[in-house]
Amino acid sequence: MLLTPAAYREQSRLYQQAAKDARSRENKLKLARHALTLAQLAEAIERDTRGEKTKEHERLLAEAVAEVEHPAPLEKKAADDERLRVKRWRMRAEELRTIAAGLSEPMARESLQRAATNYDHLADGAEARLAGRPRGASDKAG
């Protein structure tokens, strides 16, 4: 059963917003394409005043829905990927600190410690983005 054109326009608006908020380019494109399809479907239904193309509209809608997942699963995957990166950055920072602790050359030790700190700053920034809070100027990697 088809919805009203207004309902499809509202769904299109929601997918447009999800596309703007998406982190990965792939998700942005999928969501934007789906938003466009829904807007076009709303327009096509409005033009079909006699209901002659209802089956065709239902088919187009089914194809459009099959192309894209709901925004929530796409964003969950992006967030999961970001959490995995944070974990890797934290592990790499700890690894660099361990290596630095075993070095006798002060410049090499300091260099590795700075690199470890930068990995921590990357992880801090990613965690801030995941939590939806901005990162302060003093938190930036150096």
Image: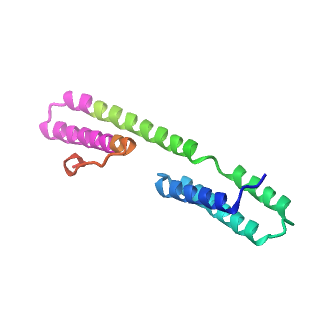
Front in this rendered view, residue 97 or 55: 55
Q: Quadrant of residue 82?
A: top left
Is 89 situated above or below 30? above
Specify whether 132 is left or right of 49. left
Q: Nearer the viewer, residue 136 or 47?
A: 47
Q: Along the horizontal axis of the image, is 110 left or right of 86?
A: left
Residue at the spot 55% in from the left edge and 53% down from the top edge: 27
Where residue 61 appears, as percent x and y from the top left, is 74, 56
- In the image, taking residue 68 as reference, residue 126 lies left or right, namely left
Up-down relation of residue 1 to residue 53 (above or below): above
Q: Is residue 78 above or below residue 60?
A: above
- Image x and y of residue 74, in percent: 56, 45
What residue do we see at 55% from left, 59% from top? 16
Q: Main secondary structure of the magenta part?
A: helix
Q: Residue furthest left?
A: 106
Of 44 and 64, the residue lying toward us: 44
The part of the image, by quadrant, that contains residue 34 is bottom right
Total number of numbered labels?
Answer: 0
Residue shown at the point (57%, 42%) measured from the top left: 73
Which percent across, then down, holds residue 11?
A: 61, 56
Q: Is residue 136 magenta?
A: no
The magenta segment: 97-125
- Foreground residue, 102 or 67? 67
Q: Residue reaching furthest bottom?
A: 47
Tell whether position 98 is magenta. Answer: yes
